[in-house]
Image (cartoon, rainbow, N blue to C red):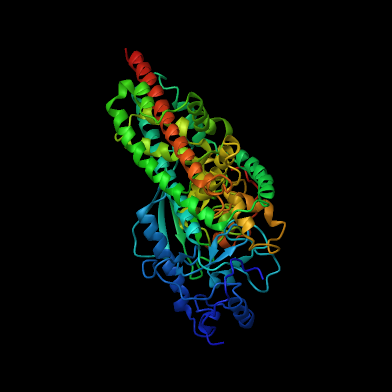
């Protein structure tokens, strides 16, 4: 019925059609459960592995932290959950509708789609990588704050103007921009649902995208080294090392980088580059950090969520996801004509969900869909992928250059300021 | 019905133990910034040092969180309190009880010790005044017999701080 991709109903061993005893209070209708598992509506109750290295391609259930060959997915936010944990989430005699443990959408429901596809796993890896990068940035920011405090104590002169926005941003736990984004996203969700995206195509493009990013990182690192050795002539030196960047595109990239300060949440490939710049600096001059930060990172990504707002487990990740989507949209608008499809469409179009998603779920659908929030280039089905990936690669290159320019400029200015104030 | 009788207390605590071990391992690899877990051999009680975030009212101050896990963790929320002296905060009572929805009604098993800690630090950071809740004395008096905050019926009225 709802099974796509011609997936056959494979027989599940009878012993996996009932709970393995992970939880004590298994007050479940065993017959019904068996039927659901045999009908591939729920993942089989395999016994979970303690660690993922035992067998290849296992997924970790975020509730019991055990590893399984396949998990169920929540219809609202696509988060995985093993069948036994899922059964715990839905107390059979409860009158209240169950909330999704991940995104708090009411009327929590799951679907089972078998093992994760290669592209889904790739997306997750990418997301994880970005979270790690975000963490690195946070550490850098902290380090920078410490440096700043030290500096303030040492010199009374308010020489560094750039420190001010950073501090305000850190304190501001604003959620306004998030809600705006959610609204916009909703509109987009609806419109994107109609666009069909062939599965294998996405798959291919995703791979190139990941590769691009890795190559970009390597290039940025080496560029950074180069820049460090030629600090004084950075402005012209690094610009000429670019693959013929046009004036326009450089400006375009700069605006993308600056978006956080004006528009709120923003994150994407551009910041990937930013991280490496920061990391490769080595012992950091705090001026350098603050200048590159004001360009590359969004203030809101560093603020903590307000405590009482029903925050779920991976709060930081959710922020990132929203941020990712923000940049998705930005690029969507910017490359006008090339970014026809967003990754978000892929799930809606894949056809597993039809009818099974309650309509109330869609508004909340928006705020926290981890698997859907993927790089912007995933979905473009119309443009030949080769062209598309090359273009985005160039864009990234230019961004790297723009950022390193921006990085070197303010820091030079700052040094002068400090120099004069010390006199 | 073969499986419903066999799972004993032992298997049940196995899932809590397993999760806590993994959370601790992850914490040690990558501790949430601003927090230190005090080494102990009791997996079911974590003592965590919380350092007030820079440029907040609690900057540089250190407080201690005590996190107790039941056998039903993670389906059951951990009990989280501040050890004496609890920070002065409009949602933190002088006996260390914290009025924070995710610790009670809004707990989700998808949350972790780390995410709870971050929420608490966020709550501290957004405070604009160092003061006790208005009903502090009354509440603390009611809790004299060592009542757990999880038995309190909390009323979450303020979503600003």
Q: Residue at x 60, y 51 (%)?
A: A344
Counting from the top left corner in percent of width and height, residue A199 is at 56, 57
For the view shown, which residue lies furthest in the left direction?
A: A229
Residue B73 vs residue A26, the one in the foreground: A26
Q: Is residue A122 above or below residue A83?
A: above
Residue A9 vs residue A371, the one in the foreground: A9
Name the side, left or right, on which B56 lies relative to A233: right
Q: Residue at x 64, y 56 (%)?
A: A348
Quadrant of the rendering where the N terminus of chain A is positioned: bottom right
Task: Note whether residue A309 is visible.
Answer: no
Q: Is residue A54 above or below residue B132?
A: below
Name the side, left or right, on which A421 lies relative to A167: left
For the view shown, which residue lies furthest in the bottom direction?
A: B2
Quadrant of the rendering where the C terminus of chain A is positioned: top left
Counting from the top left corner in percent of width and height, residue B81 is at 49, 55
Counting from the top left corner in percent of width and height, residue A216 is at 39, 40
Counting from the top left corner in percent of width and height, residue B117 is at 47, 52
Task: Note whether residue A140 is visible.
Answer: yes
Residue A77 vs residue A256, the one in the foreground: A256
Q: Residue at x 37, y 28 (%)?
A: A288
Q: Residue A402: name its quadrant.
A: top left
């Amino acid at each position: 019925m709802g099974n796509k991709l011609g997936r056959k109903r494979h027989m599940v061993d009878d012993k996996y059609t009932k709970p393995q005893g992970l939880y004590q209070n298994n007050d479940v209708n065993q017959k019904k459960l068996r039927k659901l598992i045999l009908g591939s509506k729920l993942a089989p109750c395999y016994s979970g592995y303690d660690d993922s290295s035992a067998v290849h391609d296992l997924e970790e259930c975020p509730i019991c932290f055990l590893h399984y060959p396949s998990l169920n997915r929540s219809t609202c936010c696509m988060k995985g959950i093993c069948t036994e944990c899922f059964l715990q989430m839905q107390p059979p005699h409860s009158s209240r509708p169950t909330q999704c443990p991940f995104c708090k959408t009411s009327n929590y429901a799951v679907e089972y789609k078998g093992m994760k596809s290669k592209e889904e796993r790739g997306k997750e890896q990418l997301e994880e990588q970005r979270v790690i990068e975000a963490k690195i940035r946070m550490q850098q920011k902290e380090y920078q704050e410490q440096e700043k405090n030290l500096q303030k104590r040492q010199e009374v002169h308010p020489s560094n103007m750039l420190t001010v926005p950073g501090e305000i941003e850190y304190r501001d736990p604003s959620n306004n921009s998030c809600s705006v984004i959610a609204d916009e996203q909703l509109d987009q969700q609806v419109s994107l649902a109609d666009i069909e995206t062939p599965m294998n195509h996405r798959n291919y493009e995703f791979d190139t995208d990941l590769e691009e990013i890795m190559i970009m990182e390597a290039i940025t690192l080496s560029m950074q080294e180069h820049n460090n050795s030629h600090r004084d002539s950075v402005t012209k030196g690094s610009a000429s090392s670019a693959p013929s960047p046009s004036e326009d595109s450089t400006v375009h990239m700069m605006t993308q980088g600056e978006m956080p300060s004006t528009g709120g949440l923003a994150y994407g490939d551009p910041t990937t580059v930013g991280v490496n710049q920061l990391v490769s600096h080595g012992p950091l001059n705090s001026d350098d950090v603050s200048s590159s930060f004001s360009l590359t990172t969004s203030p809101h990504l560093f603020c903590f969520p307000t405590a009482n707002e029903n925050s779920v487990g991976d709060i930081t990740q959710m922020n990132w996801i929203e941020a990712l989507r923000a940049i998705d949209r930005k690029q969507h608008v910017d490359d006008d004509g090339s970014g026809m499809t967003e990754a978000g469409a892929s799930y809606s179009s894949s056809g597993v969900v039809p009818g099974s998603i309650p309509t109330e779920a869609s508004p909340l659908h928006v705020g926290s869909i981890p698997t859907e929030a993927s790089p912007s280039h995933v979905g473009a089905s119309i443009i030949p992928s080769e062209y598309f990936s090359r273009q985005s690669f160039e864009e990234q290159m230019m961004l790297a250059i723009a950022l390193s320019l921006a990085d070197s400029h303010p820091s030079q200015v700052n040094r002068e300021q400090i120099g004069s104030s010390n006199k | 019905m073969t499986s419903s009788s066999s799972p004993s207390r032992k298997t049940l605590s196995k899932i809590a133990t397993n999760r806590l071990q993994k959370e601790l391992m992850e914490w040690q690899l990558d501790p949430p910034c601003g927090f230190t877990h005090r080494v102990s051999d009791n997996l079911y009680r974590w003592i965590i040092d919380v350092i007030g975030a820079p440029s907040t009212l609690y900057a540089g101050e250190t407080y201690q969180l005590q996190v107790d896990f039941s056998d039903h963790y993670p389906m059951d929320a951990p009990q989280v309190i501040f050890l004496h002296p609890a920070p002065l905060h409009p949602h933190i009572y002088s006996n260390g009880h914290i009025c924070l929805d995710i610790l009670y009604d809004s707990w989700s098993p998808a949350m972790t010790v780390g995410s709870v800690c971050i929420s608490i630090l966020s709550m501290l950071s957004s405070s604009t005044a160092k003061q006790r809740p208005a009903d502090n004395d009354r509440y603390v008096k009611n809790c004299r017999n060592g009542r757990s905050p999880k038995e309190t019926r909390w009323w979450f009225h303020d979503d600003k701080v």
